[in-house]
Image (cartoon, rainbow, N blue to C red):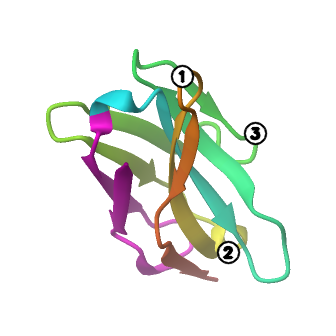
Amino acid sequence: QVQLVESGGGLVQAGGSLRLSCAASGRTFTINAMGWYRQALGNQRELVATITRSGSTNYADSVKGRFTISRDNAKNTVYLQMNRLKPEDTAVYYCHAERLIVNPYDVWGQGTQVTVSS
């Protein structure tokens, strides 16, 4: 199985930047794609950005041009660089890993809080 550990959340002023990290361990060679989701208080969990093993990326419209997802395959780590943060970006951010075929699975990290003050 795969385990995920996030880090890098915190409190930042609007317009500032943060970088989240997600370190994967275990059978990481089975992962097809990883990504970041977020859940604000009272809202459903929503996709922020995803990246495949080959490096293809996908972003929510609300973060395009401000957030960048990247991965370091040698370190089994995915990053989310968040720039020009807005108060509406405040949420718990979750790392996600999935395998799509042949024993598919979904794995979630424990979440890290990002708070953007106005």
Using the image as rendered, state which of residue 47 and residue 84 is in the foreground. 47
Whichever of labels 2 and 1 marks the residue nearer the N terminus, that label is: 2
Mark 3 or mark 1, whichever is nearer to me: 1
For label 2, the SS is helix
Using the image as rendered, state which of residue 14 and residue 63 is in the foreground. 63
As measured in the structure, the alpha-carbon distance from the residue carrying label 3 to the one carrying label 1 is 31 Å
Given contact means CB atoms under 8 Å apart, are the residues at marks 2 and 1 in contact?
Answer: no
Image location of residue 113, percent across then percent down: 51, 79
Residue at (33%, 69%) from the top-left corner? 7
Using the image as rendered, state which of residue 11 and residue 72 is in the foreground. 72
> As drawn, is 107 to the left or to the right of 17?
right
Label 1: few (<14), some or many (≥20) within 10 Å? few
> As drawn, is 63 to the left or to the right of 102?
right
Q: Which residue is mark 3?
A: 61
Image location of residue 46, percent across then percent down: 75, 55
As measured in the structure, the alpha-carbon distance from the residue carrying label 2 to the one carrying label 3 is 16 Å
The C terminus is located in which quarter?
bottom right
Residue at (36%, 47%) from the top-left corner? 79
Q: Which residue is mark 1?
A: 102
**Image: magenta residue range:** 1-28
Determine which of the numbered discs, if any, sits on residue 87 in the image: 2
Image location of residue 19, percent across then percent down: 36, 59
> With respect to residue 75, does 73 lie above or below?
above
> With respect to residue 75, does 56 lie above or below?
above
Residue at (54%, 22%) from the top-left corner? 102
On the image, which quarter does residue 16 sit in? bottom left
